Amino acid sequence: MDELGQITEHLLRFSPDGLIVVDDQGIIRFANETTYELFGYEPTTLIGRNMEVLVPERLRTRHAEHVANFLVKPSKRAMGARVAALAARRADGSEFSAGIRLAPFHINGKLYVAAAIRDITERQRINEALIAAREEADRANRAKSRFLATASHDLRQPLQTIRLLNAAMFKIVKTNEMRGLLSQQQHAIDTMTRLLNALLDISRLESGAIEPKPVPVSIMELFEELEAEFSAAARARGLVLEFDPAPAVICTDRTLFYQLLQNLIGNALKYTDRGTVNVACVSDADGVIVSVTDTGIGIPADKLERIFDEYYQVDTHGAKRVGVGLGLAIVREVARILGISVNVSSQVGQGTQVRVVIPPKSVLSATAPPQAEDEEHVRVTNNATTRLILVEDNESVRAATELFLKLEGYEVQSAGSVAEAEPFFAKLRPGDVVIADHHLDEKRTGLDMLIELRQRFGYTVPGIILSGDLPSVLRSMRSAVPACVFLGKPVDTDALVQTIEELANASRREHGGSVEQLARSQAS
Ligand code: ADP
């Protein structure tokens, strides 16, 4: 045998695959040593036999059909690569999963087929184990998200009670010492509320329960809302918070995008002791870029990658760690869902810039939208006591809410159910505000109740709906409801009072000086 022949023989012998050659009649004309080991035959005993012996008996008829088809139109193909369980039969009748690759060739015009055969039983087993492990992990993750969502939702009721009682005690208590303790308590309640909100958000985002609803969003409008939300906090920290003009309109989920910016601006304010937080919006070839730039403590370069992880907080920030480490994890999830990217650059001691890049396909316009007429805000001062009808099925929440609202100077009539509230509704008059829990009973939501009242009395009864799962409630609604404000539990007491005032004033404005007349005509 010449040198090349010897090399070829070695290669064939040590090939990790079983290699066989069959002729156009299906007779095995060559088999390497690996084939004999794989199938458990004595060396050379396969030569001259029909390749059928390598196929389990139950599959032979089907195999013969495949062979016939293949011989009509032979082509290179990887049978084993695609067919997951191509069974092969050993000499002792046992079976294994085979990956088979076929290569037809001709010698002197006669067709032969070379086949490379590999035992893929182990690979398949590992694949199956991986799939099962992945499914198990997904299941566990979904269960975790469900648990977090339920737990954080259920914790809202008691937290709501504590928050309202705290606000009520603030009204009653006069000594500075006690007020100091109450304000510490309020601080703890705020922290807990933030944590609960963040937990609920992240679990909802991760569990895939949130479907983004893209609508045209004016960045300028978002900036105005964000400015209203954060300007007091910035002032309190002695920081300049500036929003640059932002003419762009993008197509995105408004609530989620707002939430993303909220988290970034919140962080910028939190981690900046002096200077400026600037929020800007520019358009270029990459799309629209919203940037939040602060002159704060900065983030070390080696920590930049980790800040988007859940519960990660930069250790060198020490006492600055006021959050819970979920804000940027929420940003990451929201960005993933909205298909936008978020980049951070930072210099320790100099500041941080976070850039949110909205790709061109989501940009509707980079220039200014037509200006809407400025809404006229007339504040009607009101001397009359606003009457509130509170419907809340949780007794302790109801008692705490009633106490707080009475201390705020309102006339409050409270009921544990719609039926119980009926005597109060019977005397409903314009200017009264209905406050109801969203989940009232199995049949009706607070909103259903409000709509029924509006039909019954023939005017837009103002309402506030409280819910422990505000985002879900808002998402389930098809359109906004006029003169109806949804507030999340635990409710921010300032926001509650402000909303009552706005609704009551608007209702009085709508009915002008005729409130008393209308009330009288309804009574008659
Ligand atoms: P936290 O609730 O702690 O703020 P985040 O997930 O929002 O959690 O942020 C993770 C960490 O990243 C923070 O704890 C902080 O160390 C760091 N970080 C985030 N934003 C900034 C910023 N603008 N400047 C400095 N550090 C920041």
Image (tube, helix red, strand yellow):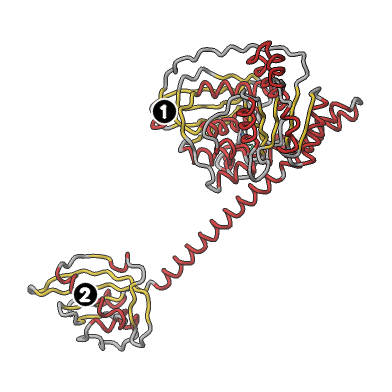
Q: Quadrant of residue 99?
A: bottom left
Taking depth in this image into account, of 130 and 307 the one nearest to the observer is 130
Q: Which residue is mark 1?
A: 363
Residue in the image at 62% along x and 53% along y: 144
Image: 277 above or below 374: below
Picture quarter with the N terminus: bottom left
Q: Which residue is mark 2?
A: 65
Residue in the image at 61% along x and 45% along y: 310
Within 10 Å of disc 1 (Cα), the crowding (few <14, some 14-19, many 20+) is some
Q: Amino acid at mark 2?
A: Glu
Residue reaching furthest left? 108
Taking depth in this image into account, of 480 and 187 the one nearest to the observer is 480
Q: Secondary structure at mark 2?
A: helix
Picture quarter with the C terminus: top right
Q: Amino acid at mark 1?
A: Val
Query: Residue 193 at x, y = what percent?
Result: 71, 38
Query: Residue 419 at x, y = what percent?
Result: 72, 38
Q: Secondary structure at mark 1?
A: strand
Q: Earlier in the sequence, mark 2 or mark 1?
A: 2
Taking depth in this image into account, of 25 and 307 the one nearest to the observer is 25
Within 10 Å of disc 2 (Cα), the crowding (few <14, some 14-19, many 20+) is few
Residue reaching furthest front? 524
